[in-house]
Amino acid sequence: MNSKFISASDVAKRAGVSRSAVSRTFTSGASVSEKTRSKVMAAAEELGYKVNLLARTLHMSRSDLVGVVGKNLSSPYISAQIDALSAALSKHDLQCILVNLAEVDGDITKSVERLLEYRVRTVVLLSGAAPDEVVRICAANGTRLVLINRSVPQTIAHADLIEADSAAGGRLAAHRLIEAGCRRIAVLVSASRTHAKRARAEAFVAEVEARGIPVTQWRNGPHCYETGAEAARVLLAKPGIDGIFAVSDELALGALNTARHELGLSVPDDLSIIGFDDAPISAWSSHGLTTVRQSLSALTEATLEAVLGPANGPTSRRSIPVTLIERGSVRPKS
């Protein structure tokens, strides 16, 4: 097994041509004779040579690398989001570099600085707030910054913002639970309380309380399935709560499965539950979770438009509409 990368110089030596001839052979549109091309391609095949795209990037005005920063990557919606985005980037011959915030102690600035060392053309933040320092260093390096459902930085002029209409989604959930006759309602937020999740919860609470219905808020624990399960154990230990809105499907599924399989409650007869996101797992027949959908395809399309835009082009703010998807975890309208 060869312990070193095969270089263009190795190919040139084997083919009996110049180093520049090898470079021209692997550069689209460059001038090279068919005889030389055949010799180079045969030598490359024999040696197993592959073009060093990272090295080539150093000579390009913009690279084909897109940095994607996120955490809680096992979350059903985040994983589906990464799957959709990476596939869309690949169709446009762009390469995705994924940074897991958990691996750098959640330091977004450090994560972005690491990506800029690879000369990425765009940084996409799926998780965490965007400190002004991140906006500044991206702008200074001619790198587009795309924020998905993130809080708005002060220097908004240098960041593309893509966000689902979280407040509208919270109101949709509130209306549906009230229509189902729920009068003892809880909202599951967890302790993370990101910009989007806060907006969902605040709009929901305001809408329900405007109808004179009190809302119990669960703000404990990390944002995960287990937190939804623990919330259900505590809130449903005594008869009372008859409706739950969770600000993500992950929390909602934790509550739903615990209510059904651990506490012996019927969903939706005893308890109505609504989530937010419409992660693919929510549609499984074993769950049948009613949820507020933020379209993955719409988010992906908007992100791709920002990524493909010119490096110094105008930034934009896009709002993704949301819809309520009925799947049976909420009682019929009373």
Image (spheres, rainbow, N blue to C red):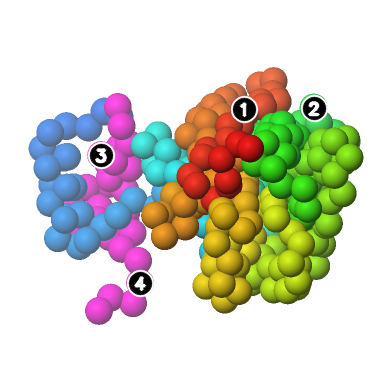
Q: Which mark is residue 4?
A: 4
**What element does badge 1 sit on?**
loop
**What element does badge 4 sit on?**
loop
Measured in 3D between alpha carbons, the distance from the residue under mark 1 to the one under mark 2, in whole angstroms, is 23 Å
Q: Which mark is residue 171?
A: none
Q: Say whether marks 1 and 2 touch (CB < 8 Å).
A: no
Is residue 174 left or right of 280 when viewed as pictured? right
Measured in 3D between alpha carbons, the distance from the residue under mark 4 to the one under mark 3, in whole angstroms, is 22 Å
Which region of the structure is painted magenta?
A: 1-29
> What's the amino acid at mark 4?
Lys
**Residue 213 position in % (x across, y down):** 85, 44
Foreground label between 4 and 2: 2
Q: Which mark is residue 321?
A: 1
**What element does badge 2 sit on?**
helix
Quarter of the rendering occupied by the C terminus: top right
Q: Residue at x 64, y 70 (%)?
A: 229
Residue occupied by mark 3: 25
Q: Say whether marks 2 and 3 touch (CB < 8 Å).
A: no
Foreground label between 1 and 3: 1
Residue 39 is at least partly visible in this image = yes
Indicate yes or no whether the magenta region holds residue 105. Answer: no
Measured in 3D between alpha carbons, the distance from the residue under mark 4 to the one under mark 2, in whole angstroms, is 45 Å
**What element does badge 3 sit on?**
helix
Label 2 CA crowd tier, 10 Å (few <14, some 14–19, many 20+): some
> What's the amino acid at mark 1?
Pro
Q: Say whether marks 4 and 2 touch (CB < 8 Å).
A: no
Measured in 3D between alpha carbons, the distance from the residue under mark 1 to the one under mark 3, in whole angstroms, is 48 Å
Measured in 3D between alpha carbons, the distance from the residue under mark 4 to the one under mark 1, in whole angstroms, is 51 Å
